[in-house]
Amino acid sequence: FCPRALVEVARCVAHKLRFLHRHNVVHLNVKPATAMVVNGAAKLVGWKHAQVLTAAAPPRAAHLTGLFSAPEARRGPVVANTKLDVWS
């Protein structure tokens, strides 16, 4: 990929995350391996750890990937939130 194409993939993934977050869904596993290009379109894959955020029972983020997880998540369990996806 050329740098311009990589920026476009990142932009598309950011738009997809914004859509998810507006619907109270967190992916919790955003990393290069889960941002794929299929038939010229960026896709966000790897939904195994995705969670719906609810006020009644905020989910815990237990399965974050090392260097792609926010610093506070590396220190121990945290309540899942959209900031964890944005950091990735």
Image (cartoon, rainbow, N blue to C red):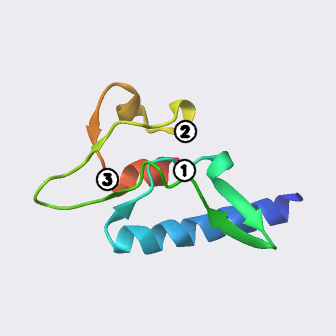
Instruction: Label 3: state its secondary structure.
Output: loop
Instruction: Label 1: state its secondary structure.
Output: loop
* Residue type at numbered disc 1: Val
Q: Give the side of residue 6 with respect to residue 58, left or right.
A: right
> Which of these two is toward me, 39 or 70?
39
Quadrant into which the N terminus falls? bottom right
Quick check: marks 1 and 2 in contact, CB under 8 Å? yes
Mark earlier in primary sequence (3, 2)? 2
Badge number at residue 75 = none
Q: Give the side of residue 76 with respect to residue 46, left or right.
A: left
Q: CA distance from mark 1 to mark 2?
A: 7 Å
* Residue type at numbered disc 3: Asn
Name the residue beneath numbered marker 2: 68
| Crowding at mark 2 (Cα within 10 Å: few <14, some 14-19, many 20+) | some
Which residue is located at x 62 percent, y 52 percent? 34
Picture layout, residue 75 above or below residue 64: above
Mark earlier in primary sequence (1, 3)? 1
Find residue 5 and report its horizontal and vertical position in percent.
82, 65
Instruction: Label 2: state its secondary structure.
Output: helix
Find residue 47 and report its horizontal and vertical position in percent.
50, 55
* Residue type at numbered disc 2: Phe
Which residue is located at x 45 percent, y 37 percent? 64
Q: Give the side of residue 79 with respect to residue 16, left or right.
A: left
Q: CA distance from mark 3 to mark 2?
A: 15 Å
Name the residue beneath numbered marker 3: 81
Find residue 87 and report its horizontal and vertical position in percent.
48, 48
Name the residue beneath numbered marker 1: 30
Which residue is located at x 83 percent, y 65 percent? 4
| Crowding at mark 3 (Cα within 10 Å: few <14, some 14-19, many 20+) | many
Find residue 70 and report its horizontal and vertical position in percent.
44, 38
Count up the numbered dots: 3
